[in-house]
Image (cartoon, rainbow, N blue to C red):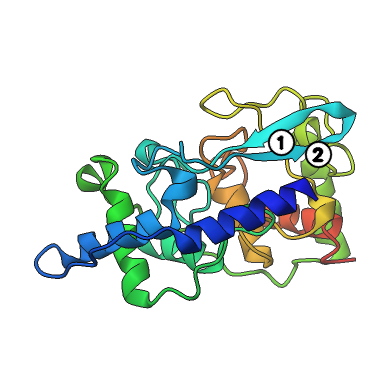
Amino acid sequence: MKSKAVLFIVMVAMLLVFVPGESRGADGQLALGKTVYQRRCAFCHGLDGDGKGLAEFVIKKKKGRVWKVYPRDFTATTFRLRTTPTGSLPTDEDLMRVITTGIPRSSMPTAKDLSPEEKKAVITYIKSFSKRWKAETAEAPVVTTKPASFGTPESIAKGELLWKNMKCWECHGTKGVGDGPKSDTIVDDTKKPILPFDFTVGALKRGTMPEDIYFTFTTGLDGTGMPSYADSMSEEDRWHLVSYTSKLMGMTK
């Protein structure tokens, strides 16, 4: 109940914060992006984009332990929800997807009410927080097609074996509920505790489609303990793992 109240206050604050001056001109897009960012994003991500806004979110886990969830630090340019290879910057389309749809089961809301111009402008402004955006370009997105074998008993069985051999259970548990022997000790790149995903709760934060699970296994979640399996598993095997984890999520039988 308390977490819902906090989330409501955050939503209201993001809608009520007023920043004047939606200027146009040569730097009009950047200026518009700044206005949108300060109105809608700064409360959580901070005026400087360092994730040190006024909001603080807490998730409670069993055994009495408490984990804090921190907003993304745009100055670090470490993005988890990408279609690009591990270590790469996300594409504009990746950023647009997150801004538009939000992140399920998180405090990141949708921004479907923003115009395409406003969303493109805020992406431009977010890039101003790091020089890396000028020094690098995003690598080509991963491309895949869901195979006919997805979700078949044979594919699920192979995926279950991969789950054991790749030691996914050490973090996610033998039944995929996020209670593996290493689940209480996982930290991100900044040494902050994070929780392994509980597959039994349903869709990933990335999305609900099998391809979304595949992208997670292929690109990894940079900045976390979730690696990319692009170099250690074949595309076929990654899809078998998708079949098995989809079963854990209740998407296949």
Residue 195 numbered mark, or none: 1
Alpha carbon separation for disc pair 1 and 2: 7 Å
SS label for mark 1: loop
Q: Is residue 120 left or right of residue 61?
A: left
- Give whichever of 42, 180 is nearer the camera: 42
Q: Give amino acid for label 2.
A: Gly
* Residue visible at 47% across and 62% down in the picture: 16
* Residue 96, placed above or below residue 62: below
Q: Position of residue 20 (x, y in %)?
A: 27, 62
Q: Position of residue 125 (x, y in %)?
A: 28, 55
Q: Is residue 138 left or right of residue 235?
A: left
SS label for mark 2: loop
Q: Are marks 1 and 2 in contact (CB under 8 Å)?
A: yes
- Estimate how packed mark 2 is, as few (under 14), some (14 to 19) or many (20 or more) residues with alpha carbons within 10 Å: many
* Residue 70, placed above or below residue 205: above
* Residue visible at 43% across and 65% down in the picture: 96
Q: Which residue is mark 2?
A: 178
Q: Is residue 20 visible?
A: yes
Q: Position of residue 46 (x, y in %)?
A: 41, 42
Q: Mark 1 or mark 2: name the one nearer the start of the chain.
A: 2
Q: Is residue 108 visible?
A: no
* The C terminus, quarter of image: bottom right
Q: Give amino acid for label 1.
A: Leu
